[in-house]
Each structure stands twice: as C-alpha cells, then as structure tokens.
Image (cartoon, rainbow, N blue to C red):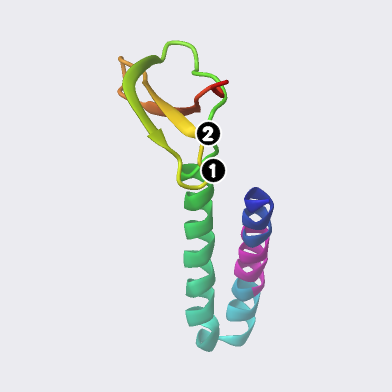
Amino acid sequence: MAGRGLRLGLALAATLVALGSILAILRGASLWGPLAVSVIVLVGLAFERWRYRPLDTAPPQGFEPTGERFRDPGTGREVIVYVEPRTGRRRYVKAPPTP
C-alpha cells in the first residue's frame, strides 16, 4: 500500500513540475517559487523510493551474514543483516518464521 501512495506522489509531483515549468515560462517569474517547491518534492519522493526499499526475502548472491539481527519496527518481523564483502553494501533480509 505504501508503494502505491509513493508512486502516486511521484506522478503528482512530476505533473506539478511539468505544469509549473510551462506556466513559469509563459507567465513569468511569479511562478518560479512554486515550481522550485515542486522540484524539491519530486526529488525527495524519488530519494525516498530509492533509499527505503522493502526487505528482501533471500540474501543476494555474494552477500554474507554479519551476525546482526533486529526487529523491524514497521512489520515487527526479525531482520538479518547481510554484507557484500567487496563493496561493503548491506542488505536487510526477513528472517524465516520460527515455529
């Protein structure tokens, strides 16, 4: 559900940027402020979508467990942390359910 709202927000912000650009060019400098705000919102939403991705269900190839575990506050599920030794990239994987 959150992904759907984020996509809608991105589409709305992109539409506002496009319309704001057209109006700012046609009408003059008075619309550059709202256009700048629309661009900031669009960049923020794009960053949010890129940065806060859902948990993986399995570790990617080449990633090793770090031994770190924590409970995800959003889902309440236990999460296992994996790292790619060559680059140091981290991935967060849902722990398998315990019986």
Magenta extent: 10-19
Residue 76 position, x and y percent, is 50, 41
Residue type at the position of mark 2: Leu
Residue type at the position of mark 1: Thr
Residue 22 position, x and y percent, is 65, 74
Number of the label disc, if any, that sits on residue 90: none
Number of the label disc, if any, that sits on residue 75: 1
Residue 75 position, x and y percent, is 54, 43
- The answer to whether the residue labelled 2 contacts the one labelled 1, judged by CB atoms less than 8 Å apart, is yes
Number of the label disc, if any, that sits on residue 55: 2
Circle 2 SS class: loop
**Looking at the image, residue 96 lies above or below residue 8:** above
Which tag, 2 or 1, sits closer to the chain's start?
A: 2
**Looking at the image, residue 27 lies above or below residue 41:** below
Q: Residue, x 42% and y 37% (percent of image)?
A: 71
Along the line of sight, the residue nearer the viewer: 48 or 32? 48
Closer mark to the observer between disc 2 and disc 1: 1
**Residue 12 appears in which quarter of the rendering?**
bottom right
Q: Is residue 88 magenta?
A: no
Relative side of 6 to 43, left or right: right
Q: Residue, x 54% and y 84% (percent of image)?
A: 31
